[in-house]
Image: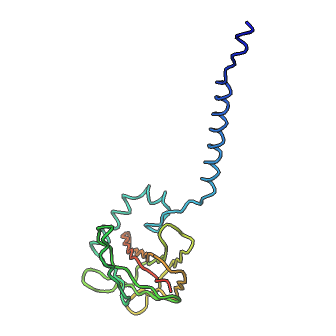
Amino acid sequence: MAKENKNKTYWPHMILGFLLVGITLGYWTVKSATSVPVQEENEYMLKYQKADMNINQIMDKKIAFDKAYLIQITNVEMQVPAKNEILHRKQKPHIVLAKGVNRFVYEVKDKEGKPVPDANVTFLLTRPHTDMDDISIAKVPFQGDKYVVENINIQKPGRYILRLRAKIGDKVGYSDIPAYLKPE
């Protein structure tokens, strides 16, 4: 009997050690996940949950808008990026932004080419993967025969997206255009 007590087993200590490591890693995972802010999707200028629940209605309204109207940006410098040999995919042309105050002019026209003065137009300047630098204009004014977004001050270099939503009756159209501000 005395001989059996000399042969100690360490498996209970190992189980407690694994349990302690598991609890510690679980705490660390929760702490690090809650410290990173969640960025909301603004693809359709709506919260992600609302866009996800109503995507069929959003797409139906967009298709109806695209059949009857056209959104176009004018008076901007477009740059076609060089072919990227690494990615092997065609990249979209983007708008060249100026550091400081920028002005964007949009045309909302029907299919006959007539301007639509009574559209409810909303503008959003955003950056991919963050909403910290978002600039939103709830009601873009109609000047002449165009919708003019003025006094947009851009200071940080990098990629941007110009988002415009035009609502005419029950039809809603969207325009997403990539833009880039070169570093100095």
Q: Would you place residue 87 above or below residue 29 in this image?
A: below
Q: Position of residue 62 (x, y in %)?
A: 34, 68
Q: Is residue 151 left or right of residue 108?
A: right
Residue found at x 36% / y 58%: 56
Q: Is residue 85 left or right of residue 45?
A: left
Residue found at x 60% / y 48%: 29
Residue found at x 45% / y 85%: 97
Using the rendered view, name the quadrant where residue 169 is placed. bottom left
Q: Is residue 40 left or right of residue 32?
A: left
For this orientation, the residue located farthest to the top is: 1
Using the rendered view, name the quadrant where residue 93 is placed. bottom left
Q: Would you place residue 122 above or below residue 44 in this image?
A: below
Residue found at x 52% / y 89%: 101
For this orientation, the residue located farthest to the bottom is: 144
Using the rendered view, name the quadrant where residue 144 is placed. bottom left
Q: Quadrant of the N terminus?
A: top right
Q: Position of residue 69 (x, y in %)?
A: 30, 77
Q: Would you place residue 43 above or below residue 35 in this image?
A: below
Q: Who is closer to the viewer here, 123 or 113?
A: 123
Q: Position of residue 52 (x, y in %)?
A: 44, 56
